[in-house]
Amino acid sequence: MNLNVFVNNFLGFIQSVRDIPWLRWLLRFLALSQAIEPVGWPTSFPLKDGDSFDFIVVGAGSGGATVAARLSEIPQWKVLLLEAGGDPPAASVIPSLFATLAHTEYDWDYTAQLDKGIGQSHPGGKIFMTRGKMLGGSSSNNYEIYARGVPEDYNEWSEVAPGWDWNTVLYYFKKLERMTDPVVLSNPYNAKLHSTSGPVAISRPKANAVFEKINERVLNAYEEIGIKRVLENNGPEIVGASRPHFTFADGRRSSTAEAYLRPAQDRPNFFVTKFARVTNVLIDPLTNRAYGVRVMLNSCEKIDVFANIEVILSAGSIDTPKILMLSGIGPSEVLEPLHINVITDLPVGKNLQDHSFTPLVFTGQRGIQTAIQNVFVASELDAYPTPTQTSFLKVNSSHYNDRREKPNIQTFNIHVGATAAPIILYGCRTIINYDEDYCFSMSKANVYNEIDVTSVLLLHPLSRGQVKLRSKNPFDAPIIELGYYRNKKDVALAVEAVKFMLRLTETSYYQNVGSKVVKLKIKGCEGLEYGTDAYWRCYVVNSVSSILHPVGTCAMGPDGVVDERLRVYNIKGLRIVDASIMPLIPSGNTNIPTIMIGEKAADMIKEDYSFTWR
């Protein structure tokens, strides 16, 4: 039994005995009572072979839960939402325990493949691709960062998909949002871009005094290297550094299960079936119309259920293309060798984009007295467990002629007090899948030193990967080719960004404590002189990992898979509502843009069938 499984089993036990008086006092003390209390998730509808509905939504994640709940606002429509997993556990609801969900029953636990010679610090060139398998999908197990992207992202989308420009999508970003940060709401320039009435709770709670001091220290250092401080990274000023906002409030994660499904569960026209795995879409070969889906129930019974109006795929950027290809919709060069009849040849699974990152580790003050920060983690269990800062910046590269104004680099920084080395080692090996040499060199730096772990993300990579079928067996995991650094311009930009962030050691605080860049043991770079351009190029290529933002595998646009109303080309009655439809990856985390897609899709569907709902 791995540690994450143990944690989830333990929290399940705590949930079952929560009414013991001393335990209730302890939970209140730790501010966890909101997460351990009964959660009231939707009950599972007992689906039967031959059942019919108006809409069938496949996948209860960021897009699927949103569009399904919104469609059920029309009382005349019977809406079925199918989810391969079950209810989110307490470790999902508690904001600080996101890292304990990987490699459990709540994770699809996919493995993605790097190209040969890329990411040699990952054993076998593999990266763990954690995806949520529960109500809420990956909104129930992500790291809760709230980010929209920038206006230019959506104006670029609208060039290939009219109607997705910033002025249009801003309405839906505001529709989903319940901003609770008084600092943002008290500033009129920021407040006009936000809403306090949506279902998804957004917060930036004040941390304990130790965390706040660390946040100030890091943000001050960023200002010294030229990254200005901004009020927030979802306001009128996006380029700059701040503490991030999060998708939780009042001690509970605001997943789409929490924000959309719990409030909608009592509607008589809304049906949710859990542990229901869709294997393929049913398509009439004469009319090319989707009329239902085939489902494997938890009892291992296979049944067919039917859609009178539409089937909506919201299984995410990995599983939506998989289901389409198993249904005969996809590239002929992928389907024909597997003897799958090609109904329509579309670039399904192609255009995979992700935010890759390069890790940097900086030492700080030496001495176990800095471990006091780790003690304060217990006071932040209902919030975020470490001091965290983020920044967006535009880094210039002579090899990367990008005239756009939007940022091309994002950074995340977490600060860890000394003596957390065993936890770092565990996370490095089991969550990110770096090799032992790399992980030991990182954790060793923390034995007697506080450290900053900075992830340097490429926001708009030129490289593309692909999702393919492994076989025609629907229970085989797909092949996920990440495709990092297939375009060498991405390497050049990442190197420039890393070299820019190395200047952190030259700032006041970090100079005073003798900060150094930790020389991590990177496989493939052993013979290179440390600090040279050749070394950093090798470092970037072989330490690369994923921030877990796959998008684009069923992209909108005339050369894509769906049109601007998310209808699959050449197939009637079939739509896609998830991150796979993004033609280009946005500037930041992808959960909130995916919920926005669900909100906008629901309105488009209502319009298509003569219902207006604003």
Image (tube, rainbow, N blue to C red):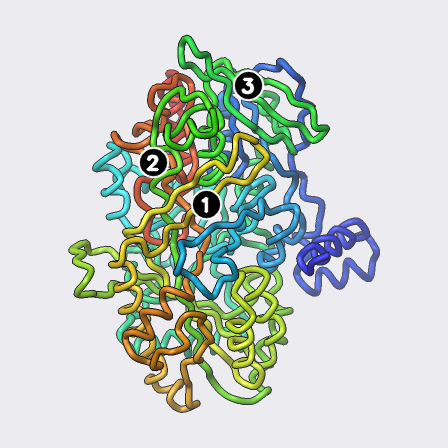
Q: Secondary structure at mark 2?
A: loop
Q: Could you tell me which quadrant the C terminus lies in? A: top left
Residue closer to the observer: 55 or 474: 474
Indicate which disc residue 50 carries: none
Q: Secondary structure at mark 1?
A: strand
| Mark 1 residue type | Ile
Is 337 located above or below residue 418 in the figure?
above
Residue 379 occupies quadrant: bottom right
Indicate which disc residue 78 carries: 3
| Residue 511, position as x, y percentages in the image | 37, 89
Residue 530 occupies quadrant: bottom left
| Residue 597, position as x, y percentages in the image | 39, 37
| Mark 2 residue type | Ala
Residue 526 occupies quadrant: bottom left
**Residue displayed at 46% across by 56% down:** 145
Q: Earlier in the sequence, mark 2 or mark 3?
A: 3
Residue closer to the observer: 369 or 584: 584
Which of discs 3 and 1 lies nearer the camera? The answer is 1
Residue 20 is left or right of residue 535, and the answer is right
Indicate which disc residue 555 carries: 2
| Residue 178, position as x, y percentages in the image | 46, 47
Which of discs 2 and 3 lies nearer the camera? The answer is 2
